[in-house]
Amino acid sequence: QVRLQESGPGLVKPSDTLSLTCTVSGFSISDGYYWGWIRQPPGRGLEWIGSMFHSGDTYYNPSLKSRLTMSVDTSKNQVSMRLTSVTAADTAMYYCGRASTGWYHAFDVWGHGTEVTVSS
Amino acid sequence: SYELTQSPSVSVALGQTATITCGGDRIGAGTVHWYQQKPGQAPSLLIYRDRYRPSGTPARFSGSTSGNTATLTLTGAQAADEADYFCQVWDNSVGFGGGTKLTVL
C-alpha cells in the first residue's frame, strides 16, 4: 500500500523559509510518477504548488515559482519543497500527492497533510 | 496555474440526483479529474480523465465533459456523500476549481 507522510515545522516566522518533506513508503519514487505539493488555506480551496519527476523534471505554480524549490532524494524515497520569504498568506495545510503521468496528472494518492502557520 | 469555475454550493435531497459543474477554457477531452474531500480529511481521487472511476469510487458517481464544462453527477445521494468536491485539469500546470460544497438534505 502506498503511503505518503508529510513532515515539517508547524510554525514558521514571516520572511523565513518553509521546508517540508514527504516520505513515501510502499512505492519507489523512481517508478514513473510525478510527486507534487498542494496546499489548502483554512476554509478555502486547493492550490497546486508544484510537481517533480524523480529525474528532475519540474513544474511549478507560476505564482510561487520565484520562491519555490523542489527536490527528490531517491535514496531516502523522499520529496521535499522549500518556500522562501513566507508571509501569513502561506498559512495552510500542505499535502503531498502522487500524480500519474498517464492519467493527465491526476493525484491518486495523498498524504494526510501537515499544517503550517506563518506567524511571529 | 489557473482556476476553474465551480458553484460554491449544491444541495440535494437524500436519494436524488446532484450535478456539480466545472467550467474553464482549458477543459479538453480526457483531462478533468474530480476529488472528494470530507471534513478533516485529505482529498481523494473520485473520477479521473473525465469519466473513469478508480477502484473504490461507488458507481453512483459519474463524470462527463461537454465543450468547456465538466460535470460530476451523483445518482442516489447518500448522507455519506456530503463533502467538498474539486475539479482539476492538467495543461503543463495544475489548475483546481474553487470547490463545491455538497449538502445532502
Image (spheres, coloured by chain):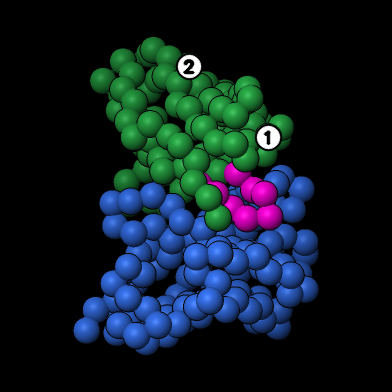
Chain colours: A blue, B green
The numbered dot on residue B28 is 1
Instruction: Give coordinates of residue A95: x percent, y percent.
Output: 47, 62
Residue stretch in magenta: B89-96
Instruction: Give coordinates of residue A2: x percent, y percent.
Output: 62, 59
Considering every residue shown, the one lying at the far left of the view is A120
**Sequence-earlier tag: 2 or 1:** 1
Instruction: Give coordinates of residue A79: x percent, y percent.
Output: 60, 74
Residue at 33% in and 19% down: B12
Residue B30 falls within the magenta-colored stretch: no
Q: Is residue A26 above or below residue B76?
A: below
Instruction: Give coordinates of residue A65: x percent, y percent.
Output: 55, 72
CB under 8 Å between discs 2 and 1:
no
How far is the residue under mark 2 from the one under mark 1? Answer: 24 Å
What is the chain letter for disc 1?
Answer: B
Q: Which residue is mark 2?
A: B75
Is A46 on the left or on the right of B69, as rendered?
A: left
Q: Is residue A3 visible?
A: no
User: Which amino acid type is shown beneath numbered disc 2?
Assistant: Thr
Question: How many discs appear?
Answer: 2
